Image (cartoon, grey):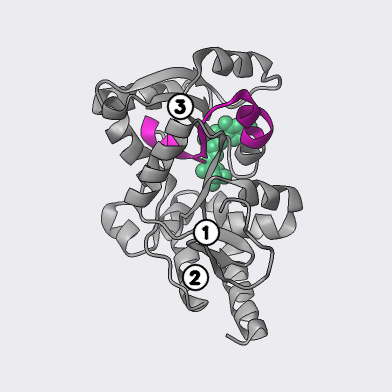
């Protein structure tokens, strides 16, 4: 039932999707998300996987092009505690947070057994290489068959390389918006089965950026940890109260 997301401003369930401010979020736990990725790889389905946070939902409200990328995505998981709170406020809780780091880490764990071939694109020069080195040490047998930094003007050589190497899973770490556009317009036509927008994940895997300690993640305040470490994110984080305000308004409006 792909492609049946609707644009209503309130939430409804369609084929396991929960609509949060018009953006369909797949109500999957980590195990289900992994199983779906395995099916997409086996079937050779070319498409995008998004791990959505409130900033992504707010961008989709502003940009119809970006919204179309989400509507066409193979899967959109709930990254960010804000999505979970929003869905709960709307009365249809989502079962689990599936973040980009959790999803990719679980895929790396399965990589050798399932023979997944990965291609990494994104982050500053050297960062994706450092991430790949750490990942290869942690998950022996993993195949990372291509690595490119994310500061390119002309991507034609990268696309040619992707077509030749034929990865199963491409991770694009170009930042929200840019990575989804690049995947939809450039990587999907190159036939890569699964491409995941992973934001700042290479910075985390390379050791350049530290993820919050587990207790902070579990308390749902990773956003606060990131804000303290990177105050420049303040303006972006204002999207969270705007998102919650929009949820409350939409709930009042829909009378639910
Ligand atoms: N980046 C990139 N190319 C660009 C702009 C950004 O490769 O043209 C990388 C940047 O170096 C960083 C990641 O994209 O590694 C964005 O990280 P951020 O945590 O801001 O991700 P977001 O929260 O936007 O998903």
Which is more N-terminal, label 1 or label 2? 1
Residue that carries the numbered disc 2 in the rendered image:
87
Q: Are marks 3 and 1 in contact (CB under 8 Å)?
A: no
Please give left or right for residue 125 compared with residue 71 in the image. left
Q: Position of residue 102 (x, y in %)?
A: 36, 46
10 Å crowding of disc 3: few (<14), some (14-19), many (20+): many
Residue 118 shows in this picture: yes
Q: Cβ of disc 2 within 8 Å of ligand 1?
A: no
Q: Position of residue 207 (x, y in %)?
A: 36, 33
Residue that carries the numbered disc 3 in the rendered image:
168
Q: Is residue 191 magenta?
A: yes
Ligand 1 shows up in the quarter that is top right
Secondary structure beneath disc 3?
loop
Which is more N-terminal, label 2 or label 3? 2
Tell me how far mark 3 sits from mark 1, CA to CA: 23 Å
Tag shown at residue 25 = 1
Q: Cβ of disc 1 within 8 Å of ligand 1?
A: no
Quadrant housing residue 131: top left
Magenta residues, as a range? Answer: 182-207
Quadrant housing residue 11: bottom right
Secondary structure beneath disc 2?
helix
């Amino acid at each position: 039932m792909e492609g049946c997301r609707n644009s209503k401003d309130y939430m409804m369930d369609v084929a396991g999707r929960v609509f949060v401010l018009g953006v369909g979020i797949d109500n999957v736990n980590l195990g289900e998300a992994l199983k779906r990725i395995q099916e997409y790889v086996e079937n050779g389905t070319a498409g995008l996987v998004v791990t959505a946070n409130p900033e992504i939902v707010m961008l989709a409200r502003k940009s119809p092009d970006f919204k179309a990328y989400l509507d066409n995505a193979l899967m959109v998981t709930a990254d960010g505690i804000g999505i979970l709170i929003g869905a709960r406020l709307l009365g249809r809780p989502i079962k689990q947070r599936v973040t980009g780091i959790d999803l990719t880490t679980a895929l790396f764990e399965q990589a050798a057994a399932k023979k997944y071939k990965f291609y990494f694109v994104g982050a500053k020069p050297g960062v994706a290489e450092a991430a790949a080195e750490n990942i290869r040490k942690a998950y022996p047998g993993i195949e990372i068959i291509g690595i490119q930094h994310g500061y390119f003007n002309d991507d034609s050589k990268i696309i040619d390389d992707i077509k030749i190497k034929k990865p199963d899973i491409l991770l694009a770490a170009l930042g929200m918006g840019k990575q989804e556009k690049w995947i939809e317009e450039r990587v999907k036509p190159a036939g890569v089965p699964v491409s995941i927008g992973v934001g700042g994940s290479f910075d985390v895997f390379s050791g350049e950026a530290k993820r919050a300690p587990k207790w902070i993640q579990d308390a749902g305040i990773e956003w606060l940890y990131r804000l303290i470490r990177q105050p420049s994110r303040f303006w972006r984080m204002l999207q969270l109260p705007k998102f919650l305000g929009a949820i409350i308004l939409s709930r009042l409006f829909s009378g639910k």
